[in-house]
Amino acid sequence: MPEQTTDESTFTAGRPRHAEYVDNPVNAAMARVLDDVRREDHPGAVADYIPELAKADPEQFGIASVSVTGRSYGAGDYRTPFSIQSMSKPFVYALALQHLGADAVGERIGVEPSGEAFNAISFDQSGRPENPLINAGAIVSTSLTPGDDGAERFAHIQAGLSAFAGRDLEVDDAVYRSESGTAFRNLALAALAKSTDALRVPIEDALDPYIRQCSLLVDAHDVAVMGATLAYGGLNPITGVRVVDAAVARHTLSVMTGCGMYDRSGAWMCSVGIPAKSGVGGGIVAAAPGEYGIGVFSPPLDEAGNSARGVAVLQRLSSEFGLHLLNRPMTPVSAVESVSADPASGRVTLRVRGELDFVAVEQVVHEALSAGQAQSCTTMVLDLTDATRVSTVSAYLINQLAADIGYGVRLSITDPSGLLADPVR
Ligand code: GLU
């Protein structure tokens, strides 16, 4: 019987209640979390600032997740289409970063959690929007994507967001028309950005593609793939297409960590702790770096404009599945797979495994130095056959070890994949 380490109230042993999901325990666990949240009271109201959004069915509720290894799971209404709205913002921001680089984008948009609502008049003293993930900053992000006019810019955005999702995303025309007929506040935000030169293209060439990007139709599975692409360093784990560079993905996730949930971003980080972005269509995209993308859909919004059940389900998932970003293992898995000594030849072999980052190599260096002290050791073999990746600092430390191991010991390295010669940052 495996040891039970998860929350006992949810994962009691026995037959799963969801016969339709017994094919896969992960689906069954997600369905159970969804059902528990559905039975609780999470007050919220469907967005009604445009008529099209007000038509959403408040009972719809779905969740999907996609691992960075490309495995997909889902429960509830995870194949129901809805408009992406503000969840487009981190992805368009990523496209702007990819096009111009972080320094040029940083001259026009800050990276600070503004602690304000999605449509706030939020600019710093120089007139630069502070937060790329609320409307003022997002309209400027849209203006920083490639293209000579709004149509070209939107074509680039549509292709880019489709690459994140791994399928061609289409605009919901009714949502687009509804939004563009009433976009007076966004027009005002764009005009303010224009007045300070944060926006350097004609207002229409930023506002129109911005409204179109918000109207793209997705489902929770698409959103999970998009999140997984950021979580996987910009590489779509389903299609294998690199959408943005790893540094761009990390920068985008950093901004999502601090700014993604309107004026509840701080509370979100404490209670959920996964970089995320919500949208007024009722979606939330969350991206756990190196692990999962998660998409949630439930239209009723709480007072801050975040999906009420979406927040609740991600809180549960984070605590019960242990997904909080800062929930790091207290005892890292040892990178040293085995240490074997052959006293007759004086050889000691250290077999190491997995990703050799700083934490892993510190363990390897420590083990190598203590094994090297043995009287009989004349040659230390560092066998990297089972290593998958060597970071630059690790390569540096292994080379230092080779130079300094001391005790008259010679270090010999077995590195069939040439990882040391080509370390990654
Ligand atoms: N299209 C919406 C707007 O710009 C997006 C708002 C949101 O999802 O936060 O008003």
Image: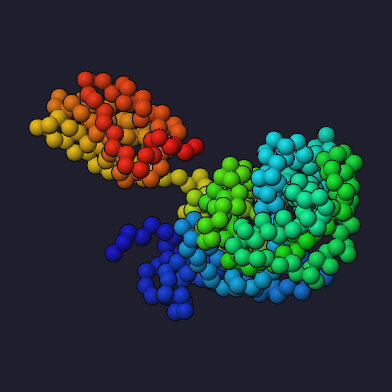
The quadrant in which residue 406 appears is top left
Q: Nearer the viewer, residue 380 or 78?
A: 380
Q: Residue 343 occupies which quadrant of the picture?
A: top left
Determine whether, in the image, residue 302 is placed left or right of residue 294: right
Instruction: For residue 163, say whether it is visible.
Output: yes
> Residue placed at 38% from the left, 35% from the top?
420
Query: 64 or 274, which lies in front?
Result: 64
Identify the residue shown where x is 33% and y is 26%.
Answer: 401
Place of residue 39 in the rendered image (x, y in percent of width and height, measured from the top left): 58, 72
Q: Position of residue 316 (x, y in %)?
A: 53, 60
Q: Is residue 331 visible?
A: no
Q: What is the residue that sits farthest to the left in this orientation?
A: 344
Q: Which percent across, then down, holds residue 369?
A: 27, 27
Q: What's the residue at 87%, 54% (across, down)?
A: 204
Q: Could you say which quadrant of the image residue 376 lies in?
A: top left
- Foreground: 354 or 53? 354
Residue occupying the point 87% across, 44% down = 194
| Residue 155 vertical placement versus 128 (above, below) | below
Q: Is residue 284 above or below residue 202?
A: below
Which residue is more in the foreground, 8 or 3? 3
Q: Position of residue 177 (x, y in %)?
A: 84, 67
Q: If the image is split into quadrants, where does the N terminus sit?
A: bottom left
